[in-house]
Amino acid sequence: EPEVTQTPSHQVTQMGQEVILRCVPISNHLYFYWYRQILGQKVEFLVSFYNNEISEKSEIFDDQFSVERPDGSNFTLKIRSTKLEDSAMYFCASVDRGPYEQYFGPGTRLTVT
Amino acid sequence: QKEVEQDPGPLSVPEGAIVSLNCTYSNSAFQYFMWYRQYSRKGPELLMYTYSSGNKEDGRFTAQVDKSSKYISLFIRDSQPSDSATYLCAMTSDDKIIFGKGTRLHILP
């Protein structure tokens, strides 16, 4: 069964460093999403991406964040200058139609020290 | 008022019992209502989604939406220890999904 994959599974970085989280969505899907989940808290929407542009973003997704689909398979989330409060699980999701049938990846645990 | 409210639990029930999980919401624009299951340190897994009010059944799972009361439910029949997980309700009216905080469910063998 096709699945969303994410790399790395765990990333440790120092405050102020740039990180890139990578996702490979399901191949025929057209809509892509990033979410984060701070430990013990709810899953929070960050951004949605369709047709090579951002279609919706939350107030969390400020200028420190960017997304890109550099080729036909990868979907990346970049955090330019990480803060301690960026420590969280980051989930990528994809869907082939509508926002309601999203398939999530296993997540990347980001630890900022 | 938070957009989506969900009792975090934990909820412990004996194996074989019927489980009822619930969420309330405030935004009447929500049209799609989803339930996800999340095991510890894993990504959410979509169980079911419904559009508008009514019931939807899939095996042991039934999702119910009451838009007039802004209340959604997930029922699990014949609960199994493998159903032990965190259950997240989620809803959307556009491209942005809003999740509840999740209810931790323990099924006791």
Image (cartoon, rainbow, N blue to C red):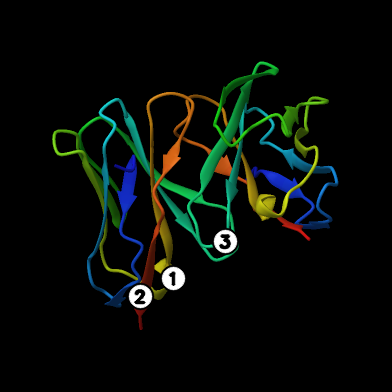
Q: Disc number at residue B72?
A: none
Query: Which chain hosts label 2?
Result: B
Query: Which chain hosts label 1?
Result: B
Residue at 60% x, 47% y is: A36
Check disc 1 and report its element: helix, strand or loop. Answer: helix
Looking at the image, do the residues carrying marks 2 and 1 touch, with CB atoms under 8 Å apart?
Answer: yes
Residue at 14% x, 39% y is: B69
Relative to residue B19, is residue B32 depicted above or below? above
Q: Disc number at residue A39?
A: 3
Q: Is residue A107 visible?
A: no
Quarter containing the C terminus of chain B: bottom left
> What is the spatial separation of the Cα atoms under label 3 and label 1, in whole angstroms?
23 Å
Mark closer to the observer (3, 1): 3
Relative to residue A12, is residue A77 depicted above or below? above
Residue type for callout 1: Ser
The residue labelled by disc 1 is B82
Relative to residue A78, is residue A98 depicted above or below? above
Q: Position of residue A48 (x, y in %)?
A: 59, 28
The residue labelled by disc 2 is B107
Q: Position of residue B19 (x, y in %)?
A: 25, 64
